[in-house]
Image (spheres, rainbow, N blue to C red):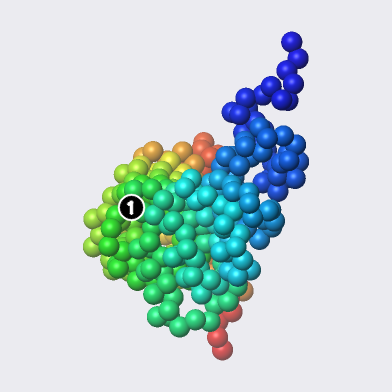
Amino acid sequence: MMTCFDDLSIVLLCKIFDYLSFIELFQAFYGLQKRLDSAIQHYPACIRLSVLNIPETIRLQCKSLILSTADVQSFQIRCSNLNFEKLRAVKFEKINLHTLYSFIDKLPMQQLESIVVGRFTWYYYPQDFYNQVWSTFMDSTSDVHLRHLHLPYHIRYWDAKKLSFDLLSLECATLEYISATQMVSFITRTPNLRQFKACITAPHRDLSRSSISLLKLQHLTLNLQDDWSLEQIQQLLATCPHLIYLNLKLDVRNDMRIMFEPSTWQKLIEDKLLHLVFLRINLGCIVSDSDENDYQTPFSQETYWCQRQPHFHVQIRKIQRNPLK
């Protein structure tokens, strides 16, 4: 028996709607029949506010929302069309700090499960204002609902020690640029973190004094800036003993020979990362023009590393820096 489109259940219609952007969905189906109109109005849509152009009489369910600085003026008008009861995700893109601050009071931040803040279009704010906005932003989130968090480069101006509650539901976090001190303060509040990605500045004594253990963290991607010793890297990785996936990038001076020894990383893995199944290490070797040492070949010849390819891979790239005259 052939089934007509009109005979499809609301559940199946929503599955079809999932393959379309909301604008495509609205333009293709709205106004054809009352049943479809009702299904669209109750469909939990992902809406980009800047392109939303519908009659004011139509009210829609909004599950996720994309906002930019251009939406500030039209927010109150456009949002009269939207029901935020089911809003679970917000993405801020092409935004500045003032705009982000203004949206905090306008949105139901406490019920959000995912928050993504893209890079700012303007950066030159006083550090105190950055700290004020980030503190207000974090205090507005939920300790029981927030599961995914992505924050941009300027999160580095946030005093993470001021976070007054644990983010118990947070499973995935990306912090584009933070200090080691900020990282320690942050992860002490995220005991159930499963994925973490960050660019971290110079190591700090808090690492050696920390007793943090992220037992559920399985995926870790780190870009380590400035000078990190092997001991400091060991201290950092010791906080996440159950890692399955590790992607590590850092630059090292060529006088730190131990960092370029295959046995060094083998021992670290066997001592600290017993559950690891995927590894990428990108080592930048800072050398002078006269350095002709081959740092890559030993990793290609050692039995331990050969047996674990392609899942384990270490890449060493030379970075030439001439000494100051």
What is the quadrant of the C terminus in the image?
bottom right
Please identify the residue farthest to the bottom as the structure is shown.
325
Q: Nearer the viewer, residue 270 or 193?
A: 193
Label 1 sits on what residue type? Asp
Reply above or below: 236 against 121: above
Asked whether 153 or 219 is in front, the reply is 153
Q: Quadrant of the N terminus?
A: top right
> Which of 192/77 is in front?
77
| Secondary element type, mark 1 | loop
**In this view of the protein, which residue sits in the foreground, 117 or 204?**
117
> Mark 1 — residue?
143
Residue found 29% across the figure and 67% down from its top: 161
> Badge 1 local density, few (<14 within 10 Å), some, or many (20+)?
some
Q: Is 184 located above or below residue 280 in the figure? A: below
User: Residue drawn 61% across and 42% down?
Assistant: 41
Where residue 172 sits in the image (x, y, percent)?
44, 49
Q: Residue furthest top?
A: 1
Question: Up-down: is 207 above or below 290?
Answer: above
Residue 281: give x, y in percent of width and height: 51, 53
Point out residue 147 in the picture as x, y percentages from the top left corner: 42, 48
Residue 179 visible at all: no
Residue drawn at point x = 64 percent, y = 55 percent:
56
- Give x and y (percent) for residue 99: 53, 71
Q: Is residue 107 visible?
A: yes
Residue at figure coordinates x 40%, y 80% from the top left: 128
Tell me how many marks there are.
1
